[in-house]
Amino acid sequence: MKNANLMSILALTTLSSLVLAREPSFDPVPLTVEVGVPVTATYIPKGFDSNDNAQIVVSGAYPNSCYKMGPTHVNDDKETHRVSIDVNAYYTSSSYCLMLYIPFTQTIDLGVLPAANYELEINKLNTQTLPVSVATRDQSDDYLYATIINVVRLSRDTFELRGILPSSCSQIAEVRVIEEVGNVLTVLPIVRFVPGCEPKEDPTQLEFAVNFKTRSDLSGSKLIYVRSLNGASVSQVANF
């Protein structure tokens, strides 16, 4: 009887060892690091002055699915008028990276800069110039704009703006399209107030959608840069 019990204990011990030996082994947690990304195009909207939040827009493509949009680091030297910009991505090491073309467009805030011509150095390779003029009024914008939510392309030369008006007594007075050097189309959704109007509490009264057109003979890649309320913007790169 004692021998039988001993044999049972040995059998259970051996089985337990086999089960433990067959436990799956897990790969270590993938490492995520910040890396620089190739910027293939830089768009510099014009019209910023010394009380604006100056912005530029960059675009490029990630080589595979292990890259995700990361932070951008901006260092400006207001004395030498040089701004260094590092456009980065988060790269996660993995054996399951899908080899896909993943385009990105990124708006970069440069902050409020004193009036000057600034030399921009992007990822230590690409050099551009950003002019900032002297502000002539206290407001950050020359016009009152609507708050833009998004811009939708309807056809080759027709786009739709969707957004929110600042008041139920306001309306879109004009959508002005300004063609600028450097493949930028600046779009100004200018708002006006309706005289004698009584404001309504219904928030649905503030939503709007309005179309605008570009020239039909445009060609190449253009940045659609839409100004928005409070110095914000909405951008889209469009190929014509």
Image (cartoon, helix red, strand yellow):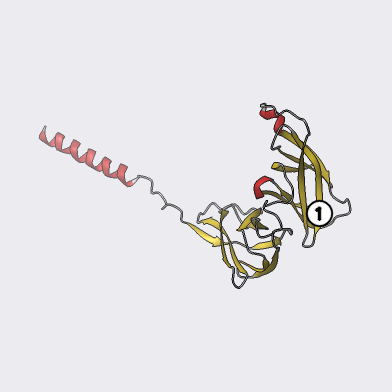
* Residue at the image position 89 percent from the left and 54 percent from the top: 217
Task: Write down the quadrant of residue 147 in the picture.
Answer: top right
Residue in front for this viewpoint, 23 or 156:
156
Q: Residue at x 77, y 49 (%)?
A: 187
Task: Name the amino acid type tagged 1.
Answer: Ile
The answer to whether one can see residue 119 in this image is yes
2 or 193, which is in the foreground?
193
Location of mark 1 (residue): 178
Q: Is residue 190 above or below residue 91?
A: above
Q: Judge whether 81 appears above or below 145 on screen.
A: below
Residue at the location (74% across, 58% down)?
A: 47
Report the side of 157 relative to 89 (left or right). right
Q: Give x and y (percent) for residue 151.
A: 73, 43
Residue 225 percent coordinates (x, y): 73, 52
Percent coordinates x, y for residue 43 in the rendering: 71, 60
Q: Position of residue 235 (x, y in %)?
A: 70, 50
- Dot 1: what SS? strand
**Residue 240 is at least partly visible in this image:** no
| Residue 82 in the image: above or below residue 152 | below
Classify mark 1: residues with Cα within 10 Å, few (<14), some (14-19) or many (20+). few
Which residue is nearer to you in this view: 207 or 182?
Answer: 207
Q: Quadrant of the N terminus?
A: top left
